[in-house]
Each structure stands twice: as structure tokens, then as C-alpha cells.
């Protein structure tokens, strides 16, 4: 399983955001459900990238949610404004690392129920986007990973017991085209 397991309460039958969208349009594809979810989060969905040369979403999930990973920022799940805090910290990490391209685009993968098997989506950031409150795997459990279109950096948001973790990775290859042949 490429995604980290999350603790869930026994007998927990709550509907989650992605399930609500999928049940609202039972004939819709997972891709359509993801598009609706991302648009509800305030992002503009531009389609799917050419994934040649990009790390698979599961690889990036492992780098931001692995056993030895330490967060760059944390937000207590119990904070009354947890979603706003997570969004503000994610945006700060994303901007500081160049994850968001000058045209406002980046890649995103949602780990919520039913959508984890999909690949990357290309999206455009817009002011007022609410990622943490919308891209969840349960109440107060945001689960998504974002990556620069050139794959030089990523930032994952995961829920770990009592805190929401934000983990940024940087391969040091800022601006390097992952599809370019490697030279000697």
C-alpha cells in the first residue's frame, strides 16, 4: 500500500468529502469526482500532466509521510482555526520553495477515499482556496500532497494523531526539467 495508514475509530460510518461527491454523482468517474473536489477547494483544475519523468504520487507520499519524517510545521487538530492555519502554513512553504509556478500552477494528489489511485492533477492556485478543510480523509483530517510541476519540491499535508503535519521536500534540482536527458 503506497499511502500511510491512518487510525480510524471502530464503527466510524461518517461520510467523507470525497465519498459525498462520489455518491452525489454515482455515474461520475473518479477523475470527475476529483475535479469537483478540487474545484470545491477553490482550485482551477487544468487536467493531468504528462507524468513521464515525474515521481509517482506514492513515492512522494512516502517522502512526506514516512516513518522517520519530521514535519516542517504542525497544527494541532484541536485548534479552532486549524484549517486556516494549515492553509497559511502550506502556502508559506509552497511559496518559499518555489512549488507554485509563476503562473500559479502546481501538481496535486488527493489521498482521500476513492481518489488515491489517481495520478497527479495540474491545478492553479487562487486566493481564498481552502485546501485543508476540503481535501480530507475524514473530519479534521486533511490528506494531500503537492509538487512543483518540475518536481523539484513537494509539500505534503497529513494528519498524525493529534497534529496535522506539513512536510516539505526539496531535491535541490530547482528549475531542472525532469524530462531532460541526464548529461555527463
Image (cartoon, rainbow, N blue to C red):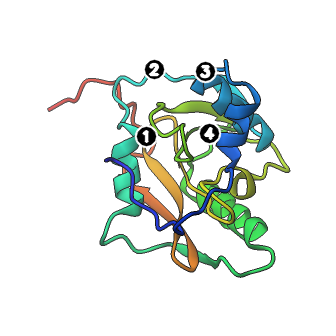
* Image position of 105 (left or right of 156): right
Question: Compared to 153, does 53 lie above or below?
Answer: above
In the rendered view of the protein, which quadrant contains the C terminus? top left
| Snapshot quadrant of residue 169 | bottom left
Provide the residue designation for mark 3.
Answer: 29
Q: CA distance from mark 1 to mark 3?
A: 27 Å
First along the sequence among labels 2 and 1? 2
Image marks 4 and 1: residues in contact by CB distance under 8 Å: no
Q: In this rendered view, identify the residue nearer to me: 155 or 173.
A: 155
Residue 16 point in image, percent of width and height: 67, 50
Residue 125 visible (yes or no)? yes
Label 2 sits on a secondary structure element that is loop
Q: CA distance from mark 4 to mark 1?
A: 11 Å
Within 10 angstroms of label 4, few (less than 14), some, or many (20 or more) residues?
some
Mark closer to the observer (4, 1): 1
Provide the residue designation for mark 4.
Answer: 101
Label 4 sits on a secondary structure element that is loop
**Residue at horizontal 73%, vertical 72%?**
82
First along the sequence among labels 1 and 3? 3
**Residue at horizontal 41%, vertical 55%?**
170
Residue 174 point in image, percent of width and height: 44, 46
Q: In this rendered view, identify the residue nearer to me: 144 or 14.
A: 14
Label 1 sits on a secondary structure element that is loop
First along the sequence among labels 4 and 3? 3
Mark linked to residue 151: 1
Within 10 angstroms of label 3, few (less than 14), some, or many (20 or more) residues?
few
Image marks 2 and 1: residues in contact by CB distance under 8 Å: no
Q: CA distance from mark 2 to mark 1?
A: 12 Å
Mark linked to residue 50: 2
Mark closer to the observer (2, 1): 2
Amino acid at each position: 500500500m503506497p499511502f500511510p495508514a491512518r487510525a480510524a475509530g471502530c464503527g466510524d460510518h461518517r461520510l467523507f468529502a470525497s465519498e459525498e461527491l462520489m455518491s452525489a454523482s454515482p455515474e461520475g468517474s473518479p477523475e470527475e469526482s476529483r475535479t469537483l473536489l478540487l474545484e470545491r477547494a477553490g482550485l482551477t483544475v487544468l487536467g493531468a500532466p504528462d507524468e513521464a519523468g515525474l515521481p509517482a504520487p506514492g513515492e512522494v507520499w512516502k517522502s512526506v509521510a514516512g516513518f522517520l519524517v519530521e514535519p516542517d510545521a504542525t497544527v494541532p487538530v484541536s485548534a479552532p482555526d486549524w484549517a486556516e492555519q494549515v492553509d497559511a502554513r502550506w502556502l508559506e512553504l509552497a511559496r518559499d520553495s518555489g512549488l507554485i509556478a509563476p503562473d500559479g500552477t502546481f501538481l496535486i494528489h488527493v489521498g482521500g477515499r476513492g481518489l488515491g489511485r489517481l495520478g497527479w492533477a495540474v491545478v492553479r492556485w487562487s486566493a481564498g482556496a481552502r485546501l485543508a478543510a476540503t481535501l480530507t480523509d475524514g473530519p479534521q483530517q486533511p490528506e494531500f500532497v503537492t509538487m512543483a510541476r518540475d518536481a523539484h519540491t513537494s509539500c505534503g499535508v497529513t494528519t498524525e494523531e493529534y497534529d496535522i503535519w506539513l512536510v516539505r521536500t526539496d531535491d535541490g534540482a530547482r528549475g531542472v526539467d525532469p524530462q531532460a536527458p541526464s548529461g555527463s
